[in-house]
Every structure is written in structure tokens, then in C-alpha cells.
Amino acid sequence: MYKLNIKKLIITLTSVLAFSVSSASADGHIKYSVTADNVAEYSAMLTPGMINMFSAYPDTFRMDVYESGGRCTMDSDIMAISQSNGTMINDNEGLELPNMGQIPFPDPSHAQHFVWNYRMFAGSVSAVDRVQTSARVTADGAITTGQQETTISFPVNPNTKTMYANKNIFALFMQKNLGPPRSAGLVTLVHDFIDSYMQPRKAWQYAPATRRVRRAPDISYDSLTAAGGGIQTIDSYGGFNGAQDKYDWSYEGMKKMIVPNNNDMLADSTIENTFTPNHPNPDVVRFEEMDVHIVHAQLKPGQRHLYASRTFYYMDGNPGMLLYHDMYDGNQDLMRASYQTTVQGNMGGQGLEDTTCNVQGEYTFDFATRTYVGTNLFGPAVQPRGSIYNGEEKAVSFYTPDGLRRYAR
């Protein structure tokens, strides 16, 4: 039900013989809207996942397209050291870089360069202290919300003050679930490494039911996130994270597409206003036209993953934000689609330059269950307090199993 096959998508996209655009209006006003009635005119600029949203929800799904609200930027210190490409090593699972903390590939020429650039973008800050919100909406419109208190250190950042002996550490991540009640009190500690060929991810969890800290070897790949409502995999958290070794990667080119961008309206919209049945309220989701790089991942023979293939859509330029992610099953049918919304600056927090790219939220749609979830939701209307970037760093001892035990209790 509501599944679209890749072959059918190719036919749909290549059959578009003409493309019409409504006359542009002033900045801040809608140029044109894409609806189920006119989606064929714009299908060449849409992902298969977004085309299927019109098929699944023809009466309510809409994309309002605005004039460009300006491009976000990278931190100026990171741009200053990002002058030349690094090198992928260890079957493309590791990096050798001219400068620690740089954009790995300021001039990308390989499919995985885009994956690496986006993954390492998180390290453009030295530390994060935040409480993010999540919301799950079932087919009947019922909303379940949660919050997660998260602390992260990025030793790869050139401004990080805390010293770590292991130079392969990319991120030290601690997250406490504050709700919903069924997951409240669950705490997860992750040591994420740059080169997963040399050092696979390590994780531990504290469960309030047992009051014990245990290793959590399944915090990777297609295990499910605690906040993702049963439809978000671990490696889809943050758009995509972790090892790339299960897939063969190919670059499918660049084209102009309709993408979510400058989504301040979402940051200022309440959960109740945003999370309407089947998809976020179209009145508060802002789209623009932008050049996008398309990267496809095909599961390698003999490997296992819930998604047999995936297609990622990255913003042109630096930092190359991930905008869309389409996920397919073993029959090459579209299972899920997601988009990631972006803003510029702090969203009521502190520590970023005014034009620095920042994620407002991740929205994942499951076509079989007609359920969707928003995770990593940020903004004045959905956070109890603003996020702090590049602030005080936690001691090394905080990111240990003993530190996890102390923090959980």
C-alpha cells in the first residue's frame, strides 16, 4: 500500500516533458505551491519520497516554495583550514586529513565524499549541551511526545580543550531519555570513531528497570532509536551516521530540486500546530529551489540491512547538509522517506555564528503504517531551553561506564 517502485519512478520522472514555474514573488512570500493536482509539472525537481507523499496524502500534502532565504555557512575557523581534500583509507572507512577538524573534502569528487562531509559537519563545534524534542504521529492523528537530554563532545574540533589520547575518537555522546514514560530514564553512552574499520562503535546503556549498565552492541546500523517511534534506524539518526561498509556507493549527479530550507517557521511552531495527521502542517514547512547532489547506496552482496538501498540528497556547497533520504526494501519498493529541515544560527541558543547551518529537525514517514515521527526537534517553541554550542566541555570521566552510572542515578 502506497509503495512506489524504482522502475515506476524512473518512468514517472523521465516522462515529464515540460516544466512550468509560477511567477516569482517577493522574498518571504510563496512563489508557487506544489499539490497533488500539479505535482506532475514539478516531479523532475522532487524526490521519489516526496512524489509518494502526494500519492499517499493527495488531499492534504502540499509544498510551498519560497524565494531563496540565503545560504547558510560553515564556521569560519573550519573553513580557514579546509583548503584541500583529504584521502579515504581502510576501504573508505577512515580518513587521512591535512588538518584535524577540516571539512574532509571541500572539493568532493566521489560519492562517499558527500557522506563524509556531512558526517564530519557535526565536529564543526567542540561541544553540545541541549534538550531536544521528539514527536510521533500515528495514522489516527494521535501524538506522543518525548524529550532527550544530550551532551556531546567532538575531540576532532580544533577548538576542543579537553585532550583525548585516542585521536580516532570522533564523538563522545551521552543521552538521557526524559520521556515518553515507557523510555524515561534510559541512558545511552556512545564512543563513535572516525575510522570504524579500525575501531567499531562502542556503546553502553543504563536501564532503570535493572539499574545496571550494560554494553549495547546493537547501537548501530538498522537497530531502532529510542525516540524514533519504531520507524527510525540508528544509522538514520542525524540523517545518516556511522559506518558506511554495508553499501556500495554511487554518485548520481547534481540537479535543481525543491528542498526544505530556512525553516524558522518550524522552529517557532508548537508541537500541536506542526504535527498534523500524516505529515507536518504544510503552512509551517518552507521549501526553496536549490542545487542538490544525489548519492545512492546499494546493499553489498552478503550484507544484511533493513534497507536494501537508500538514496541521499545533499545540499550543494559547504557544509553539504543532508536534505532528503529515501529508503527501499529488498523488492526496491519505497518503504520510508525523510527530510531534514535547516535554519541559520542558534534558534534561541548560543555559541554559533549567525549564518552557521543548523538542523531544526528530522521528519521520517512510513508509508505502510501511515505513521511519521519528528526527532531532533529544535527551536523556541519545542525546546525547554536553548542549545549551547561550543560551551563548557565535560570531563573525560563523564563519558565512561562509571560516568554513565553516576549520571543515570
Image: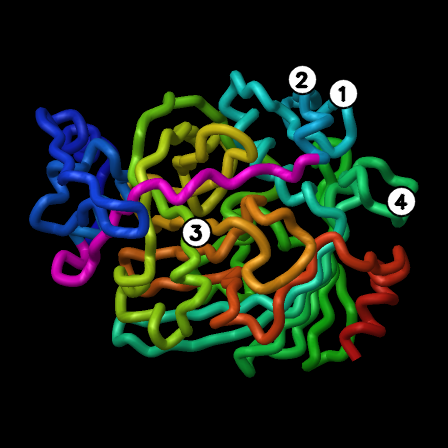
Residue 300: percent from left, percent from top:
48, 29
Q: Which mark is residue 84?
A: 2
* Tag 1–tag 3 contact (CB < 8 Å): no
Task: Give the Cα distance between marks 3 and 4.
Answer: 33 Å
Q: Nearer the viewer, mark 2 or mark 4?
A: 2
Secondary structure beneath dot 3 equals: strand
Amino acid identity at mark 1: Pro
Quarter occupied by residue 61: bottom left
- Residue located at (33% from left, 52% from top): 286
Amino acid identity at mark 2: Ser
Magenta span has 84?
no
Q: Nearer the viewer, residue 121 or 278?
A: 121
Residue 172 in sight from this viewpoint: no
Secondary structure beneath dot 1 equals: loop
In the rendered image, which quarter contains the N terminus? Answer: bottom left
Task: Give the Cα distance between marks 1 and 2.
Answer: 7 Å
Amino acid identity at mark 3: Thr
Q: Magenta segment range? A: 56-76
Task: Give the Cα distance between marks 3 and 2.
Answer: 28 Å
Judging by the rendered image, the residue that carries numbered circle 3 is 341
* Tag 1–tag 2 contact (CB < 8 Å): yes
* Tag 4–tag 1 contact (CB < 8 Å): no
Residue 170: percent from left, percent from top:
74, 42
